[in-house]
Image: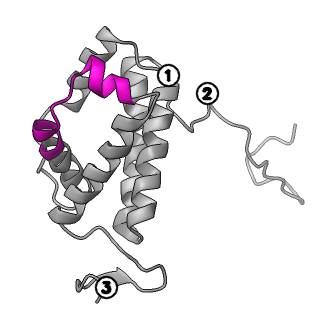
Amino acid sequence: MSGDGRAGAHPEAGRPDIRDRADVEALVAAFYGRALADPLIGPLFTEVARVDLAVHLPVMADFWEGMLLRPGAYRRNALRAHTDLHARSPLRADHFARWLLLWTGTVKERHTGPVARRAVAKATDVAAALLRRTAGGPGPGTDPQPGPRPGPVDVAIGPPPEGRPTS
């Protein structure tokens, strides 16, 4: 059991993994506390989108509960909200990078374990996808150069395989 009397904690880190809706709600609320106060992305929520937290937080808890614990909990179009916002105030790579930084920091401060790691990985995917679909960028933390990357070169020593030219 963890210090809060709940099972599922990782005693080596002293922080529990994300286990249930209550954990998701607390995580989302903590994140939005940071996001709304942030000088870069806070105004997007407070001045542009004019987010009503009483309405927005349960929707975001549904989203993250669906991503992490119970698929199907979220039944809305996340892209539409962001394309609408982008039309009013263009979203940029630095907005998504800050969102991801704040989300990752909030998750890591509160939780550790496989679901917490998935929360960070999913957020990275979400940020990249939303940036790509709104502003056309590659996403925060991604390689801006599309296409194949140089990789290891296989070198065979000995005779070439049968049927393969020796050029």
56 up-or-down from 79: above or below: below
Residue furthest out toward the top: 87
Q: Which badge, 3 or 1, is on the more N-terminal residue?
A: 3
* Residue 131 location (% of width, % of height): 42, 26
* Residue 106 location (% of width, % of height): 41, 55
The secondary structure type at the circle numbered 3 is loop
| Whole-number angstrom distance, CA of label 2 to CA of label 1 | 8 Å
| Whole-number angstrom distance, CA of label 3 to CA of label 1 | 42 Å
Q: Which badge, 3 or 2, is on the more N-terminal residue?
A: 3
Q: Which badge, 2 or 1, is on the more N-terminal residue?
A: 1
Is any part of residue 52 visible from this angle?
yes
Q: Is residue 47 magenta?
A: yes
Q: Residue at x 52, y 34 (%)?
A: 140
Query: Is the residue under label 1 in contact with that under label 2 (CB below 8 Å)?
Result: yes
Magenta residues span: 42-58
The secondary structure type at the circle numbered 2 is loop
- Quarter of the rendering containing residue 89: top left
Q: Which tag is nearer the camera, tag 3 or tag 2? A: 3
Residue 2 is labelled as 3
Residue 137 is labelled as 1
| Whole-number angstrom distance, CA of label 3 to CA of label 2 | 42 Å
Question: Which class describes the residues within 10 Å of circle 1: few (<14), some (14-19), or many (20+)?
Answer: some
Question: Which class describes the residues within 10 Å of circle 2: few (<14), some (14-19), or many (20+)?
Answer: few
